[in-house]
Image: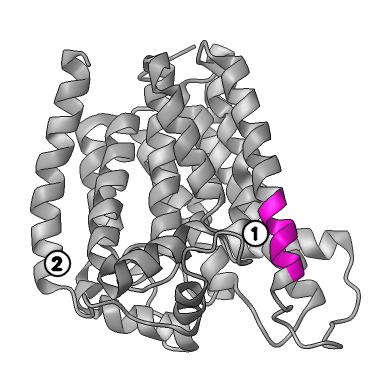
Amino acid sequence: MNITEIKIITIIIIAVTVFALIWISVIPGAGGVWQHDSGVYDQQGYNIFGGWPPVYPFLLHLIGRKIVTPQIIFAIISWCFAGYMLAGLPGMILAGVFVVSPRFAGWHSMCLTESVSLSLAATTLGLSVMMIRWKNWWIPWAVSLVLFSLTRYSNVFIIPFFAWPLFFCKCKLKVIVTIIITILLTSLFISNFRKNIKPISEPGKFTEEVSLMETHLQAATYLLDPAKRPYFLGALCKTDTYPCSLSESSQWLGWLELPGQGYLWLIMLLFPISDIVRRRKLSIGSTVIIVLCLASYTQCLVNAAYDSIATGHTEVYRHLSICDCFFVFSLIALIRRNKWNI
């Protein structure tokens, strides 16, 4: 471990200690908000082939409701780490502010998969940059990617976008093999899930057929228009089970409410485009912005397709939390998007 790596770890540990002590001492519901799915995960327990994504049920059964405290600490560590790797100290501070904002704080106080999923996404993103700078970080990156995919099955649709370090790192073959193995492994678990878990939507409840264009338009709406989404960055929604619980858990953070305009993403994309026009190559930061936007749109597209065939149940506020996470790190990547170039 070189001096630079030691400095990175030291800075993150100091930040984590400060943030964690403040958060754990004042956050409501620190004992863990329990939802219906929480009981389902706990019941599956150590049976990794029980049907549901295996990572969180295993951890929840092992730790119980006290899992909320390590969730909070892990969230702060991972977000500050990714922020630092993308934009140095300013990025770490900005990530630290976002991770305790109303949009995300509620998830960290609930015994559901979202908190760990978002933290693993941030960890993988930070390790991607580490792997580019120091190739011996490939193994931690691979482990983090697999865990991310097996925390929520909807994550598998965006796994290919985590291959972006190919454009910069020297271990290209290892990255390709890891992506393929992760997708195949998750597919095996998904196959088991479809056999063992009953469909959530009631039989016969289908909407009329919609066109491919309508599905894409709905996905774009999910991605960009906060007025059409039940719960967006910085917004405290008062309806439905999960958002209501999130709001109650995040009220003390109301002063941190952040802009809820997904249209900012279109403006952010102008910077990578200008890099291509002016320099004919992309920096790491510009690549991250493009990749995270495309990954988020893919997630929105999957959710729009699901909503187009089943009614009476929607997971939009859960599935799209990853999009808001990527939105945050796109903003952070803008800070020093030309720091490391091809």
Would you identify the image quadrant in which residue 109 lies?
bottom left
- Give the quadrant of the N terminus: top left
Q: Position of residue 297 (x, y in %)?
A: 64, 52
Return the mark for residue 24. Answer: 2
Q: Is residue 128 visible?
A: no
Please state the extent of the stretch shown in magenta in the rendering.
Answer: 188-195
> Which residue is painted at 44% across and 26% down in the image?
139
The disc placed on residue 110 is none
Q: Magenta region, mostly helix, strand or loop?
A: helix
Q: Residue at x 79, y 73 (%)?
A: 308
Residue 94 image point, x, y percent: 25, 46
Answer with mark 1 or mark 2, whichever residue precedes in sequence.
2
Looking at this view, name the residue that lies furthest to the front.
47
Residue at 46%, 81% in the rendered image:
39
Q: CA distance from mark 1 to mark 2?
A: 33 Å
Coordinates of residue 337 in the picture (x, y in percent): 40, 27
Kindly identify which residue carries mark 1: 300
Q: Secondary structure at mark 1?
A: helix
User: Observer-nearest residue: 260 or 30?
Assistant: 30
Mark 1 residue crowding within 10 angstroms, few (<14) / some (14–19) / many (20+): many
> Residue 153's quadrant in the figure?
bottom right
Q: Nearer the viewer, residue 74 or 254?
A: 74
Residue 112 image offset from top left, x and y in percent? 43, 70
Task: Using the image, determine if residue 301 lies above or below residue 161.
Answer: below
Does residue 321 show up?
A: yes
Judge whether residue 214 is colored magenta. Answer: no
Question: Quick check: 81 left or right of 54?
Answer: left
SS for dot 2: helix
The part of the image, by quadrant, that contains residue 59 is bottom left
- Residue nearer the viewer, 172 or 98: 172
Amino acid found under the numbered disc labelled 2: Ile
